[in-house]
Image: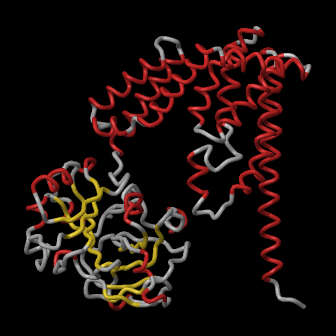
Amino acid sequence: AENSKLAGRTVAEIGLDKLPGVFLVSIDRPTHPSERHHQPGLHHQQRKKPRLTVITNPSDASAEGQDNETASVANMEATFITIAPETALKEGDVLWFAGSASAVGDLRKIPGLMSYESEEVAKINEKVYDRRLVEAVVARRGPLVGKTVKEMRFRTRYGAAVIAVHRDGRRVHEHPGRVKLQAGDVLLLEAGPTFIKRSVDNDRSFALLAEVEDSAPPRLRFLIPALLITATMLAVFTANVASLLICALVASTLMIMLGILSEQEARDAVNWEVYITIASAFGIGTGLVNSGVAGGIASFLVDVGEAVGIGDAGLLGAVYLATFLISNIVTNNAAAALIFPIAMDAAEQTGVDRKIMSYCLMLGASASFMSPFGYTTNLLIYGPGGYKYSDFLKVGTPMQVVLWLLSILFLSMDSSQWWLSWIITSIALIMIIMSSVFGMSLSSFTSSSKQAPSS
């Protein structure tokens, strides 16, 4: 982009070589014919107004599986080569990325990058921060078949700009405005928030429409107001002027009124599944209390704690154990809601501070290391990472035991001994850092030893 802060910085400094789901495959750099020279990964061309673009299909980065394969891009030859991290960017460089459509949303959030079709996109009659990326499939009997984007006056008719066209899983390497569309073509569009609803209700041009998740551009002008509102909310709550619920509601209302957050975004931010799960768990918990089951389980936990013979720490340990075992089977929210009445009943029987018992419950419910189903992130890496259930048991069980012992130790301490918990935590943190550094050093030494020629 013009006057971009990225000019003069390297690919590694900006972090373009470590973006999830997308990688930089080529740079088109405008230059005078007399200044042309070969640089690895750079493709030079003459252009008065160079722009930035993306390839939204990984297959475009390697044609037929061959490295350094050339492809026609808008009547020019661009060589797709992995860019060296130390390559410095210049103003006007055209960066070609390969990745999924969802990764384009991440690129849009990098200040200083602008779309290859920025001139067309700028003409959309929608506020910049309200725009979204949408994938649209051209309908078989729709008016778009056999026509180019320019002939259809696409932006005027649909209120959206075409960023890229895909056909048979590959990007059509031609300017989107000149592509003669076919049935089944996938268009990557930049459009307003109501585009999908308008198209579904009033148009038959598209067989399928899907918004690219989290593809709205960043609202950088709202950064300072959002930070001030958040800081004020925390300050008011910390000063005990109002409850956290009231502070959060007021802060959310202010953000909606100022346009920092739209009403739809506010509604979408509410995870109704979590609230329904918690509400259902509270219902089950109430049933346990009314039936006397909670009291019976609480008495059992108290007996277990007394049998250990270490006072309140025994009861806290038993409650923590029961909570984290359940949290490895159901969600942590449901586990906390189920155990809450039992834990409070046990605290009442023994005189343990209810606040300490609540901390024990929170820590136990958040310790879901032994099962892939205990927490969302566990489940996310379970399939793609090729892990087995036994892997979680091998790695998660030691973590679970260590956290269990440390949590009970800290919770059992007198409030005047707070400094001791800080010392123990600091020592543990230093040990973790040292072990990480040692592990990286060992890995580096091992790899260098393997690469060294044998004598």
Q: Quadrant of residue 55?
A: bottom left
Q: Residue at x 37, y 65 (%)?
A: 101
- Picture layout, residue 269 above or below residue 98: above
Q: Quadrant of the C terminus?
A: bottom right
- Picture layout, residue 98 above or below residue 454: above
> In the rendering, at what x and y percent does residue 264 appear?
28, 39
Q: Quadrant of residue 7?
A: bottom left
Q: Residue at x 18, y 50 (%)?
A: 197
Looking at the image, which is closer to me, 134 or 293? 293
Q: Is residue 366 left or right of residue 78?
A: right
> In the rendering, at what x and y percent does residue 217 appear?
33, 52
Q: Is residue 237 left or right of residue 425?
A: left
Q: Is residue 63 left or right of residue 45?
A: right
Q: Residue at x 78, y 26 (%)?
A: 318
- Picture layout, residue 253 above or below residue 37: above
**Residue lying furthest front:** 291
Q: Quadrant of the N terminus?
A: bottom left
Q: Residue at x 11, y 73 (%)?
A: 150
Looking at the image, which is closer to me, 272 or 422? 272
The image's colour scheme reads secondary structure
> In the rendering, at what x and y percent does residue 278 appear?
51, 29
